[in-house]
Image: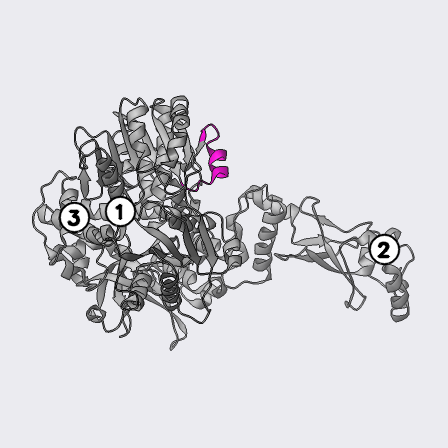
């Protein structure tokens, strides 16, 4: 194996340093050969844990390692993944998937009995791998200075890793692969992807010998290309799809060598880039595309995005053709596109839902992500969204500390919503726990086709769901009973309250409790249900509505009785177009959805005021009376943020003002009962509540509303969010001034709009001194003839200002 050439260097590095980076190309033997060498030669007293990001790879790597020892997995080499484990008391090398290592650390932070943790395929920069590294570094610093960590990757981002982990030695294996001829073969822009790809595959098969690996972005594209290749390739050629959700037997068929005299085409997602060795490949066709999940913090949904792969992925994919002999790779895009591609893919931590991640950190005892070492720090906006979700699930309190329920959720080893549902099921008794566990299993690995009705699947459980449900039930002290489909609605509602949905129209469209839209095909049987719970949603590409993948019809009245906490009673105000007035309603609501409403003849003042605030939030700030004083105060505050940034001025953008209505507008609503009264509210006076006494004093001194010119006239200053402040003043009233007035404590010059005696514009200047010395001469010459009764001195900077004509001088 190529990596054998650096084995001694790697062993020495592990002896001298707690953290080592190994850069070895795909096929170097770092996953399937090196761990056994470390087990035999590194002199480690304890076990080795190796983290593999993908389940398919973890299982295959474990089998390959055990095979070399002449054993079955579960003896010296074992593996652990969700719902499946083969490890025993004699296991010294254990391959684990993502989440398992984190659970091991949470249960035993010292990792007793473990000497080395290997993070394989680290270049994939999965969220769990980044979390595992941060926790391991924390363990090394505080608990185990003898624990070794080895980061292995095919395409390390060495610059970033070396910056963040400067003391870690880097061992580089050059690898040993055969030359690969890389060609760029873009297909016509008018061709559909599956047509262009299928043509390229047939061409390459006709021109070359050997088996072929085709990279496609997702399962849908794999199936469409399979349809086009079926019956179009030679009889000796097998077509083998390969993706994570395939049954194991079909995955193995794609990976194992074909019989003598036969060849195969493996149609794979990017799962085949690095982790797996696929036997017999010497031809690669690369679509240049991948499908990645991106989390939207605004609506809590994930959308699948098809995008160009990175240059590192292109190298990985091409390298698959040179593992056994010289090979050929066709990239189905232009060389210029390859050169413009990003160097490395964006890490998951920057584009993922961080609710589960943040729950793990809180359980670890970390209340600030900055306490740990990250290659890329988790985004603050995603962490804030995670906090909001955890609070709504009861996992944290208002101080963002873990609750008793939150600690129980964190120990269950599943996503927070699903963990909350398990806790709710356990509270309902044995049948509730069994039902919740099956729902969790179903939602973790949802069916890819067929029924979208969750009720159907509860009565037709798949074997792997049953195994997972049994495993989950063992993590709670209660004994599980039988699945009771009648409990499903209230269990799902406690985890997905925001995804309760009400039908709108007859075309399969629904409104969610969080205010978003969702939809299914109108010919689906569930499209006739007036109310649904929709736990599985996917943000659409070109539609504002999310796509409903799984749903359960519910009796909303029964659900409201079972879970009264999800229903709120609110007074709302609406504009009554017929009467031309505001009208108050009392509503029972689940989020944005109305269960029932009744008009209120005379609502209580406090209820009405809150309803008015909600109406303003809905309609926007434009429904208020923004007179000049209010507009200018808001503009002065915006300018203060730009010109005096060292002070903590309150934000006054639309979103900030709408969020803070209770603070500044509510006190002005006393006695307001209709739109006319709302229009009479003094908005400038209300806005001033955002400022404390010191801020008011500084604002009035630094950015006054008026400026007193030399004649004593007090003239208004006009502020603008994007431009300098302006002052319109008759030119004669500025005589004697040496320079333009300064605001913002001397930092900003006022732009003077100098006017004629008839108040017509003469000149605009931000530098009065330069104007007196220059352009004033032309103005003087012209104005003397037009306004002979007024003073036009030769030295205006040293002339007394005046409002009058010569007669009164």
Residue 20: image x %, image y %?
41, 30
Distance (Cα) linking label 1 and label 2: 80 Å
Front residue (pair 207, 231): 207
Badge 2 vs badge 3, beta-carbon distance below 8 Å:
no
Magenta stretch in the rendered image:
154-170
Distance (Cα) linking label 3 and label 1: 24 Å
Residue at the location (43% across, 58% down)?
330
* Label 3 environment density (alpha carbons within 10 Å; few <14, some 14–19, many ≥20): many
The circle on residue 772 is 2
Residue 795: image x %, image y %?
90, 54
The circle on residue 56 is 1
Residue at the location (36% across, 58% down)?
216
Labels 3, 1: front one: 1
Q: Which quadrant would residue 85 be assigned to in this image?
A: top left
Residue 678: image x %, image y %?
46, 63
Magenta span includes 159 = yes
The circle on residue 437 is 3
Sequence-wise, the earlier of marks 2 and 3 is 3
Badge 3 vs badge 1, beta-carbon distance below 8 Å:
no
Labels 2, 3: front one: 3
Front residue (pair 808, 470): 470
* Label 1 environment density (alpha carbons within 10 Å; few <14, some 14–19, many ≥20): many
Classify residue 608 as left or right of residue 568.
right
């Amino acid at each position: 194996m190529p990596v054998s050439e650096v084995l001694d260097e790697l062993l020495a590095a592990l002896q001298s340093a707690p953290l080592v980076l190994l850069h070895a190309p795909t096929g170097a033997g770092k996953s399937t050969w090196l761990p056994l060498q470390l087990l035999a030669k590194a002199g480690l007293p304890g076990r080795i844990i190796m983290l593999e990001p993908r389940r398919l790879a973890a299982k295959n790597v474990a089998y390959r390692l055990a095979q070399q020892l002449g054993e079955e997995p579960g003896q010296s080499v074992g593996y652990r993944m969700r719902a499946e484990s083969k490890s025993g008391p004699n296991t010294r090398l254990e391959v684990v998937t993502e989440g398992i290592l984190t659970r091991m650390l949470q249960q035993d932070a010292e990792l007793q009995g473990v000497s080395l943790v290997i993070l394989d395929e680290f270049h994939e920069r999965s969220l769990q791998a980044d979390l595992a590294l941060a926790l391991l570094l924390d363990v090394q610093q505080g608990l185990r200075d003898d624990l070794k960590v080895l980061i292995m990757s095919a395409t390390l981002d060495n610059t970033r890793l070396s910056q963040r982990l400067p003391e870690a030695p880097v061992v580089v294996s050059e690898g040993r692969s055969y030359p690969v001829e890389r060609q760029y073969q873009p297909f016509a822009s008018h061709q559909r992807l599956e047509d262009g790809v299928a043509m390229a595959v047939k061409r390459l098969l006709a021109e070359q010998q050997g088996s072929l690996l085709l990279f496609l972005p997702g399962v849908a594209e794999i199936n469409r290309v399979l349809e086009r290749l079926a019956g179009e390739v030679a009889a000796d050629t097998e077509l083998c799809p390969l993706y994570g959700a395939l049954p194991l037997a079909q995955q193995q068929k794609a990976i194992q060598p074909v019989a003598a005299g036969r060849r195969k085409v493996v149609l794979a997602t990017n799962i085949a880039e690095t982790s797996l060795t696929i036997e017999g490949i010497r031809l690669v066709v690369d679509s240049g595309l991948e499908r990645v999940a991106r989390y939207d913090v605004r609506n809590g949904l994930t959308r699948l995005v098809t995008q160009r792969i990175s240059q590192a992925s292109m190298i990985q994919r091409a390298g698959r053709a040179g593992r056994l002999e010289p090979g050929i790779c066709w990239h189905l895009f232009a060389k210029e596109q390859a050169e413009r591609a990003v160097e490395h893919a964006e890490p998951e931590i920057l584009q993922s839902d961080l609710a589960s991640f943040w729950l793990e950190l809180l359980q670890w005892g970390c209340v600030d992500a900055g306490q740990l070492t990250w290659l890329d720090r988790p985004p603050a906006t995603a962490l804030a969204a995670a906090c909001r979700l955890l609070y709504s699930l009861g996992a944290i309190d208002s101080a963002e500390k873990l609750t008793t329920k939150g600690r129980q959720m964190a120990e269950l080893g599943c996503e927070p919503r699903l963990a909350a549902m398990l806790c709710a099921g356990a509270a309902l008794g044995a049948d509730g726990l069994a039902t919740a566990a099956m729902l969790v299993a179903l939602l973790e690995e949802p069916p890819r086709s067929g029924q979208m009705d969750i009720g159907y699947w509860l009565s037709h459980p798949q074997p792997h769901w049953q195994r997972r449900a049994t495993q989950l039930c063992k993590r709670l002290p209660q004994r599980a009973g039988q699945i009771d489909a009648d409990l499903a609605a209230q269990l799902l509602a406690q985890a997905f309250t925001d995804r309760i949905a009400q039908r709108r129209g007859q075309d399969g469209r629904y409104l969610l409790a969080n205010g978003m839209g969702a939809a299914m095909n109108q010919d689906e049987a569930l499209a006739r249900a007036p109310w649904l719970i929709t736990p599985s949603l996917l943000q659409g590409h070109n539609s504002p509505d999310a796509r409903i993948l799984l749903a359960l019809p519910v009796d909303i009245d029964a659900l409201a009785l079972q879970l009264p906490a999800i229903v709120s009673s609110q007074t709302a105000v609406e504009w009554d177009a017929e009467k031309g007035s505001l009208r108050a309603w009392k509503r029972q609501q689940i989020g944005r959805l109305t269960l029932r409403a009744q008009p209120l003849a005379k609502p209580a003042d406090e209820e009405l005021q809150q309803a008015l605030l909600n109406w303003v939030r809905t309609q926007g700030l434009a429904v208020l009376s923004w007179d000049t004083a209010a507009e200018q105060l808001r503009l002065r505050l915006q300018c203060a943020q730009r010109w005096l940034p060292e002070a903590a001025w309150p934000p006054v953008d639309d979103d900030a003002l709408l969020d803070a209505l209770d603070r500044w507008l509510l006190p002005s609503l006393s006695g307001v009962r209709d739109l006319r009264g709302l229009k009479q509210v003094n908005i400038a006076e209300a806005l001033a509540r955002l400022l404390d006494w010191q801020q008011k004093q500084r604002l009035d001194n630094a950015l006054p509303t008026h400026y007193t010119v030399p004649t004593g006239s007090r003239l208004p200053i006009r502020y603008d969010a994007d431009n300098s402040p302006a002052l319109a003043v008759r030119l004669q009233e500025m005589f004697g001034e040496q320079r333009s007035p300064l605001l913002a404590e001397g930092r900003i010059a006022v732009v003077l709009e100098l006017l004629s005696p008839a108040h017509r514009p003469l000149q605009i200047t931000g530098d009065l001194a330069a104007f007196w010395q220059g352009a004033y001469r032309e103005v003087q010459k012209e104005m003397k003839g037009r306004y002979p009764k007024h003073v036009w001195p030769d030295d205006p900077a040293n002339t007394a200002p005046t409002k009058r004509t010569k007669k009164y001088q």
